[in-house]
Image (tube, rainbow, N blue to C red):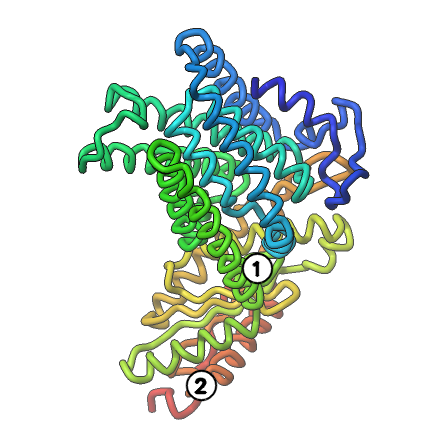
Amino acid sequence: MTSGGVSVSSSIDAATPFVRGRARFVSPYEWALWKTPRPIVTYILGVEVLVALLTAVFVALVPIDRSALVPFAVLLVCIVLYTEASRSIEQIREHNAGSPHVDLNSVWMFAAVLYLHPVLAAAVITSSYTYRWLRVRHHIVYRQAFSAAGAMLAGYAAWAVLHFGAGSTFADLPRTTLAFALVAGAGMLFLVINLGLITVAVSFTTPNPVRAVVLSSPSNHALEAATIALGAMVAWALADWPAALVLVVFVTLVLHSNVLIHQLREKARIDAKTGLLNAAAWTSAVDDELERATRLQQPSGLLVIDLDHFKAINDEYGHLAGDEMLRAVANTLTSEVRTYDIVGRFGGEEFVVLLPATSATETLHVAERIRRRIAELVIPIPDNGSISMFNRLTVSIGIAVFPQNGHGRGDVLHAADMAMYAAKAAGRNRVHQAVEPAEHQPL
């Protein structure tokens, strides 16, 4: 079922921006999937083939009760109505996210997993992704298909936990603490499997995929958990009080609007190309941290990191390749520092990192580790319709320490910047430490 859906859907070129009615049909040989590295192709097709096989097993072994067709139809109607009601909000979210994000249609999908036959639940999931693709935005199809397949695989696992753990359908479950724990466990499994599949996919292009996916946006994971909880409430409403679905739709729409407001606020703080703090947000966060460091009398290390020969690389390989390199450096930085360290992009090819409660010696060790990791990067970049591997990226790093190198953010940043230029002048691909002002030097 999934494989067939991908074959049909992938014949539409969805790599272009969403313009309804102008999707372009292309030859299967031109599908965007084949332009990705082979391990990604193998992984995506492997997951989809597994889902297809499991679907066939469920069709053969688990009979479908005709009474389930009514709630199945109700959930399909909910998907259509909710997508239409939230379409303007979701298009703004999609436009501003710049990357895949939590889809609140998980409410209806997880309800289907709990309440319906697994194949009918898979049909609800497929319908949700397809209708969203048609009405919200034409994503690259192989990614949309993989997301749907991942949700189906997670749904099959959650259904198995509920079915074999309780020995009955959701509608027949006793309303006890144990049954509640079982439903919560199924929801947790649904979330973890989805997250795990994404983490594996990200691992092909990111040095530390677990950190990149699991720690990148805790608020997104909390939102996903909330949608799964609402899905359990939808299943409960289908079983005991269908009219309560109206309340769930209302709550979900309000949640959706609040998510958009939060996302727009976050976008104002985030650099679009790298996902790091932009210069203004980084400056504000650093000022707050240095005030705290002053009260606690703690040192803080500051790194200014500049990519070597980046203009020449951009000129030779193009700006798309340059953007891939910026993202690779950003991922390396976030994977090599602590969660509470403050990482930002200052524009162009310059990055900045503040390391709270870090001595000069520790700052130097962190800077050297980052320099080595970036020099070891092998970055997949677009090259005339194919993917090339680039492994010649280096950085020059200047470091300074608060308060030894200055009494405020501006002074310390200037000291680290001068040290970075000294590293450039000394031959690049190295770390230089700022010289302490005379009042801090020993007699």
Quadrant housing residue 424: bottom right
Distance (Cα) linking label 1 and label 2: 26 Å
Quadrant housing residue 288: bottom left
Circle 2 Cα neighbour tier, 10 Å, few/some/many (<14 / 14–19 / ≥20): some
Q: Quadrant of the N terminus?
A: top right
Identify the residue under disc 2: 408
Mark 1–mark 2 CB contact (< 8 Å): no
Q: Amino acid at mark 1?
A: Val
**Residue 213: image x %, image y %?**
45, 46
Q: Secondary structure at mark 1?
A: strand
Marking on residue 418: none
Residue occupying image coordinates x 38% and y 76%: 289
Q: Is residue 311 left or right of residue 242?
A: right
**Residue 192: image x %, image y %?**
37, 37
Residue occupying image coordinates x 43% and y 82%: 405
**Residue 84: image x %, image y %?**
62, 45
Query: Nearest the camera: 166 or 85?
Result: 85
Q: Quadrant of the C terminus?
A: bottom left
143 lies above or below 4: below
**Residue 136: image x %, image y %?**
65, 44
Work out whether mark 1 precedes mark 2 in sequence or the reverse, and give the earlier one. 1
Marking on residue 395: 1
Residue occupying image coordinates x 36% and y 72%: 360
Residue 14 in view? yes
Q: Amino acid at mark 2?
A: Gly
Q: Is residue 236 left or right of residue 384?
A: left
Q: Is residue 80 left or right of residue 361?
A: right
Q: Nearer the viewer, mark 1 or mark 2?
A: 2
Residue occupying image coordinates x 73% and y 53%: 319
Q: Secondary structure at mark 2?
A: loop
